[in-house]
């Protein structure tokens, strides 16, 4: 089993245990309103908002230096990074 899968399973079990232990109702103030909600609902909402924000922030395309230069029309006079000399190619193969 991969480490990532194991981590997801462990986190899911821990979140479920924490949610089930906090099922009692509490007073929740939102601006001028007093809401009586179970802690379970509040914690579930916070967890889902955190997951969604994490997914949105982790899926942003990163802009490397080369992409930035191409996007702004700057010329790149240097050779590409993957250029190898003949000696290096012989050593690798």
Image (tube, helix red, strand yellow):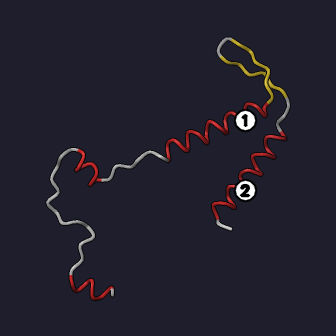
Q: Is residue 92 above or below residue 2?
A: below
Question: To which quarter of the image does residue 82 belong?
Answer: bottom left
**Apparent side of residue 60 relative to residue 39 in the rendered image (left or right):** left
Q: Could you tell me which residue is drawn at 27 percent across and 48 percent down?
A: 68
Q: Quadrant of the N terminus?
A: bottom right
Indicate which disc, 2 or 1, sits on the residue closer to the N terminus. 2
If the image is split into quadrants, where does the C terminus sit? Answer: bottom left
* Location of residue 72 in the rendering, given as x and y in whole percent from the top left corner: 21, 44
Please tell me which residue is depicted at 55% across the width and 43% down the height of the picture.
54
Q: Secondary structure at mark 1?
A: helix
Residue 27 to residue 50: above or below: above
User: Which mark is on residue 9?
Assistant: 2
SS for dot 2? helix
Say the numbered circle drawn on residue 43: 1
Instruction: Bin the neighbour count of mark 1 within 10 Å (Cα to Cα): few under 14, some 14-19, many 20 and up.
Output: some
Q: Position of residue 80 (x, y in %)?
A: 23, 65
* Residue 19 rendering spot, x and y as whole percentages: 79, 40
35 in relation to 54, above or below: above
Left or right: 8 as drawn, with respect to 89: right
């Amino acid at each position: 089993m991969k480490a990532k899968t194991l981590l997801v399973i462990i986190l899911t079990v821990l979140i479920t245990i924490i949610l089930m232990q906090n099922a009692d109702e509490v007073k929740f103030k939102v601006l001028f309103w007093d809401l009586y909600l179970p802690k379970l609902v509040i914690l579930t909402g916070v967890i889902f908002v955190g997951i969604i924000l994490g997914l949105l922030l982790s899926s942003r395309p990163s802009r490397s230096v080369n992409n930035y230069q191409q996007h702004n029309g700057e010329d790149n006079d240097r050779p590409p990074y993957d250029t190898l000399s003949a000696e290096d190619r012989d050593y690798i193969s």
